[in-house]
Amino acid sequence: MSLTHAYAVIMAGGKGERFWPLSTSRRPKQLLALAGGKPLIVQAVERLAGVIPPERVLIVTNESLVAPIRDLLGEGSPVGILGEPVGRDTAAAIAAGAAWIRRRDPEAVFCVLTADHVIGDLPVFRETLVQGLTLCAAHEVLMTIGIGPTEPSSAYGYIEAGAPWLSSGGIEFHRVRRFVEKPDADTARQYLATGRYAWNSGMFVWSVRSIRAAFAEFQPALAERLDAWSACAGDAEFQAALERDFPDLRKISIDYAVMEKAPNIVMCKGAFAWDDVGSWPALESHLPADGQGNAVQGDVAAAGSSGNIVVSDGRLTALVGVRDLVVVQADGVTLVCDKAHSQDIKTLLAQLREQPGREPIL
Amino acid sequence: MSLTHAYAVIMAGGKGERFWPLSTSRRPKQLLALAGGKPLIVQAVERLAGVIPPERVLIVTNESLVAPIRDLLGEGSPVGILGEPVGRDTAAAIAAGAAWIRRRDPEAVFCVLTADHVIGDLPVFRETLVQGLTLCAAHEVLMTIGIGPTEPSSAYGYIEAGAPWLSSGGIEFHRVRRFVEKPDADTARQYLATGRYAWNSGMFVWSVRSIRAAFAEFQPALAERLDAWSACAGDAEFQAALERDFPDLRKISIDYAVMEKAPNIVMCKGAFAWDDVGSWPALESHLPADGQGNAVQGDVAAAGSSGNIVVSDGRLTALVGVRDLVVVQADGVTLVCDKAHSQDIKTLLAQLREQPGREPIL
């Protein structure tokens, strides 16, 4: 098939709290080479090679990250970058992306991808996109890319598959029965056992026409903005319209805004490796092992210590008799965190934000 | 009484392993201001004010530490500093100190003090020295300064008091029944309950004549060296003699060499505050508290963390959800150590010594 109408929107917002102090508000996770050797945002663009050419890729990010991302991609890159003046969650970001694409090609079909996940099995990933884009060009559906779960994780939302819809290029597509919030461990085990549930990855495929129709039905104010933005004559005018309109938009995710309401939802269960690397402990499997049971990057020495995750930037980190810690050195800051409490980094950051002079490290 | 014949030898050897990475071989514990605001060696000299004038104080240390200690004391300081060419434990260091003093005053009485302990209640400490020096000038005894134990510590050797010997200036002196090695916790509790035991602090008082006589009886080779050294015409010749003789000396502590053998041992139970601050955990009570149950020095932020000891030199140390750790930042090194495993820092250092290029941090 021809993918001449295919585009991609890469969602690259995010505050960079969970990998602090390596990530900061000016250098959030998607800009870091946490795994795979290159910055995650660069990997997100490059893995589209052969499916969607870079000039039809749009990154939607915070305004303050436009220049750093441009630097990472290289000055000559034809990838589009849109800066949101304020964060209004995924529904608004997707509407802006849809408008940018619609201005170029009202017949377009596009995938919504994430900037800060680690994805493997690229041929499978690409084939999934190709089949999804092809089906969404032919059918007025909203497609979500679920991930076949490999463990009963309570860290993700789940999508329950309904009746089979279509099969194409060896990939099965189903109707969606329901979206469910992050389950407890028991429920997650039941989900895994049924084989019917997939992780909600935050990746989608649809035509401009279909998503506009869904916005018109469930988020009419946003549909109106989408229409206005896509009528803008040039990129400068478009950016100015976002500056003007974004602050008034409702902060809502695409899941709440559309996916959990619309009747024409379909899903495929992505059969590629996927990891959202959502916190320091999740990085463990992506770092080299030190032979003592620690996952380490940089200059680390350990005695009687195991199960630790250490990222040591420019100094020696020495561990003695400690277990299951996250120790991170970055930019004049050392974090020592219990692996089971990495979600409390946010509490610490809230505390630091109250202190004068902390801005450069946050 | 007159203390015109009173001298002091301050023992300032030590490898600086236990407070690594703040202490290193070139900057061991006694050179650090771990507590009390000034380097411990400077405090050790200054606390003799009014008892022994600085020109009658001798520091015995490693050769490599002579210049740094001279710097800390100030160029104009009249304190003597002797550099041992190789470490031969306390018997040899005390013999060298005794020779240095005997050259100046064969009638001298001197105390042997430590450079790296924290001592409080200075008037009591000074009165203890004054009474001890006075008695040792009049009696041929070897006096050890025990410390009245405040807890059933298993970290110290103990001295069991025997029959009362004398009382002077309100201070009780006893014969010594025996020296005992570091006890287990139960034994330490029994010791404390009897009221007869004191901690072995490594501080002593005796006349040059008495200690020489003890060496002559129990360590004749050392007594011979003491005689030869004290016949040296000047300090340069003296230092050259040490260079020549030290490598051949037996490595033995004054306790094993003399104190556990001699019949004329007496002790006083020092009633001043004393802490040998022998490891990172022992520093806890000397550091400021952060209000969350952590002992911290420097820039430290903590969330859901308590019982930690943090010394943060020049960078922010952030703790999240951790307990009972020692975290130390110094000279491009970060140590993260379980409080209960601080003795294993030595294991780590042994490991680092095998690695090329680690010299500057060891």
Image (cartoon, coloured by chain):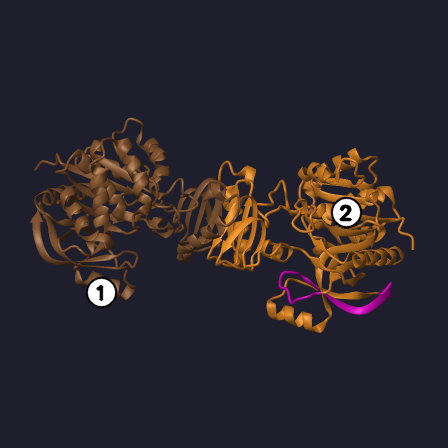
Chain colours: A orange, B brown
Of B354 and A318, which appears nearest the observer? B354
Of A138 and B41, which appears nearest the observer? B41
Give the crowd class for mark 2: few <14, some 14-19, many >=20 residues within 10 Å: many
Residue at 67% x, 61% y: name it. A157
Residue B121 appears in view:
no
* Residue B190, horizontal then vertical, whole percent: 22, 65
User: Label 2 is placed on what type of residue?
Assistant: Val
Instruction: Specify the subunit that label 2 lies on.
Output: A
Give the crowd class for mark 1: few <14, some 14-19, many >=20 residues within 10 Å: few
Decide whether residue A161 is among the magenta residues. yes
Q: Name the residue under label 1.
A: B190
Where does the N terminus of chain B fall, quadrant-wise? top left
Q: Name the residue under label 2.
A: A45
Q: In which quarter of the image is residue A76?
A: top right
Where does the C terminus of chain B fall, quadrant-wise? top left
Mark 2–mark 1 Cα distance, whole angstroms, equals 72 Å
Q: Which mark is residue A257?
A: none
In the image: residue B19, left or right of residue A136: left
Of B136 and B38, which appears nearest the observer? B136
Q: Name the residue furthest right.
A: A1
Q: In this view, does A105 lie above or below A123?
A: above
Q: Name the residue furthest top.
A: B76
Magenta-drawn segment: A149-170
Decide whether residue B279 is among the magenta residues. no
User: Label 1 is placed on what type of residue?
Assistant: Gln
